[in-house]
Amino acid sequence: MLETKFKIALLLTVLFLASLPVMGILKGTFPPPEEPLPLSQDVSPPGVSSSGAPVNETPVKEEVVLIPAGFFLRGTNAGGYDEQPERRIYLDAYLIDRYEATNHQYQAFVVATGHRKAAPPSRYAKNLSRMRGANQPVTYVSWDDADAYCRWNGKRLPTEAEWEKAMRGVDGRLWPWGNDPDPLASNWGSARDGFEVTAPVGSLKQDVSPFGVADGSGNVMEWVADWYAEDAYRYPSDRNPQGPDHGVYKVLRGGGYTSAGADVRITSRSRMVPDFRDETIGFRCVSSGEEVGKGRSPMKG
């Protein structure tokens, strides 16, 4: 009898000890402490004060650049598998925003449409307080947010090919300024460029393409229209390629303020699920067709 009681007690002890991890999982863990945010940041959208007025900087003008019809070299054989092969691609003429969409511009869209604000999924965002300037690129926007903004503005997101030609020109260069990397030429993973987070658009004067389009190499990565496919460049499509008709990930192009190394190369391709939002991701828009045919001015006041 004593032996039976001992076995029962031992079994209950083992069961109790085995249940402790399960109890911990069911109970959950405490979330990390949130960085305190001033009251004005709790109630104000990016780029505006608590009264709804822009912060103390003059918003940059919305400018567009005409990219003429013609061929350019897409991809590089010196890059990763998804950047190959190099191929001459023909694109019709189009207009692309000179700068990434800014906090001020995106807030006008939010006010006009009631679309959700550009904000992180939770309030825990380490650099949020330093990235709210009117002329800093808008961040914490999903692909759908970016697409909705461009459509509201009478535009659309660029295709991968349109983005690459606008940033690279037609001579096959790997960076907007040429073929040699320069860690101080764009706002990327080094505070030596003068910016610890995103810079006001157009701040880095070397990070400008032969066409005059700014911040392709740094500042924020940018959503484009295409679905991502690792072998997309291996299918013949030499005129106005649109990319795959479906996929899991959307393509991101360009480097961000945390990027380093090959990520800053203009031919580099990144990918992310469309509903992802992050402080390193923004966008710009393009227009084509009738707008270009009408000879629309390359500057919009």
Image (cartoon, grey):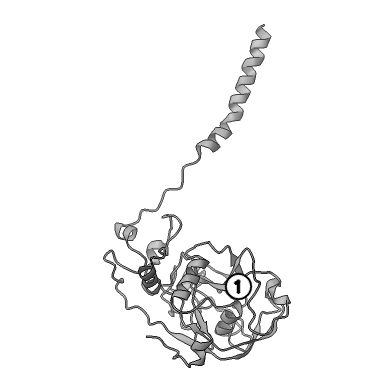
**Percent position (x, y) of residue 138?**
43, 70
Examine the image and state in which quarter residue 246 appears.
bottom right
Q: Which residue is drawn at 28% across and 70% down?
A: 53
| Residue 145 visible to the viewer | yes
The quadrant in which the N terminus is found is top right
Residue, disc 1: 226
Above or below — where is 50 with respect to 193? above
Number of numbered discs overlaid on the protein picture = 1
User: In the image shown, does 130 or 269 lie closer to the viewer?
Assistant: 269
Q: Is residue 143 left or right of residue 125?
A: right
The quadrant in which the C terminus is found is bottom left
Q: Is mark 1 on a helix, strand or loop?
A: strand
User: In the image shown, does 94 or 88 lie closer to the viewer?
Assistant: 94
User: In the image shown, does 80 or 53 lie closer to the viewer?
Assistant: 53
Q: Residue furthest front?
A: 290
**Percent position (x, y) of residue 259?**
54, 69
Examine the image and state in which quarter residue 74 appears.
bottom right
